[in-house]
Amino acid sequence: EVHFLNVGQADSILIQLPNSQTMLIDAGNNADGPAVVSYLRQQGIRKIDYLIGTHPHEDHIGGLDNVIKDLAIGQVYLPQITNNTKTFEDVLQAINAKSLTVTTAKAGVSIIDQENLKAVILAPGGTAYESLNDWSVVTRVQYGATSFLFTGDAEAQSEREMLASSWATSLLKSDVLKVSHHGSHSSTTQPFLNVVSPKYAVISVGVGNDYGHPHSETLTRLNRA
């Protein structure tokens, strides 16, 4: 089961895996932390086996410290990039307080590799980005014949890098696409969308947000696809 949590102009995705394990990708803004924890508890979850912070922007990692403090945590995956914010420091302090180790999230890292269940990281594939968004961890989860692509806020540069990698390109095709960067026109480029070729697209976005997300260009591309 994949739950796209209602955290407004932010991201938080819970994945309940068929092996009774759980994965959480992002945890909304700082203010969303308690609500995310409450939602997880309502689902009967006491442990997050795989915790992914896609990139160090508050609307993605803001509530991670709450999750780390309040639930048992298995493996933590973060990209190799820091951010000089209290939000990022709070996450690191929560990780250190529990003596958790962080696995660097980058293209090629396999999270789960079982016969009918696979979770693999397709990006970031580079080491130099102008935008923090392009450091986003892009994760593909496949169970049987059904696949989900979770893109964080990855923008055009990251998408181009995935398309330039024959290995990553071979894995991009997915049934469900979590549309990157809240539907911004800077992501979900046409070449990328052509390869992913999703049946469904999910946009995590706040009503009446200041950014105009989701942008009309992105919606047009999705509608055509």
Image (spheres, grey):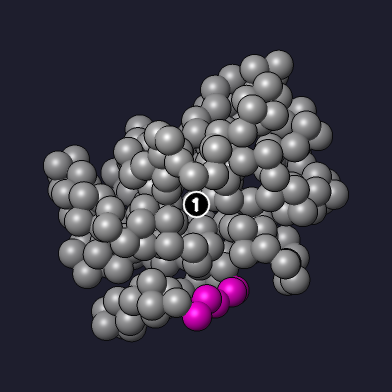
**Relative horizontal placement of residue 145, taking residue 72 as reference (left or right):** right
Quadrant of res 106: bottom right
When the figure is inspected, residue 33 is found, relative to residue 202, above or below; the finding is: below
Query: Is residue 46 a member of the stretch shown in magenta?
Result: no
- Magenta: main secondary structure: loop
The front one of 20 and 89 is: 89
Amino acid type of the residue tagged 1 in the rendering: Ile
- Give the residue at mark 1: 112
Q: Is residue 60 at all visible to an observer of this figure?
A: yes
Q: Nearer the viewer, residue 142 or 187?
A: 187
Relative image position of residue 44 (x, y in whole percent): 15, 44
Q: Residue drawn 55% across and 27% down?
A: 201
> Label 1's element?
strand
Q: Where does the image place residue 111, in percent across and percent down from the top left?
A: 51, 56
For image coordinates 72% across by 67% down, the residue present is: 130
- Tell me the magenta residue range: 80-84
Is 165 situated above or below 72? above
Task: Give the quarter of the image for residue 134.
Answer: bottom right
Residue drawn where x is 75% and y is 37% of the image: 189
Q: Few, some or many C-alpha atoms within 10 Å of disc 1 (few <14, some 14-19, many ≥20)?
A: few
Q: Is residue 47 left or right of residue 189?
A: left
Q: What is the quadrant of the C terminus in the image?
A: top right
Q: Residue at x 32, y 48 (%)?
A: 21
* Vertical arrangement, residue 104 with respect to residue 208, above or below: below
Residue 72 visible to an observer of this rendering: no
Number of marks present in the image shown = 1
**Residue 69: x percent and y percent?**
22, 69
Position of the N terminus by quadrant: top left
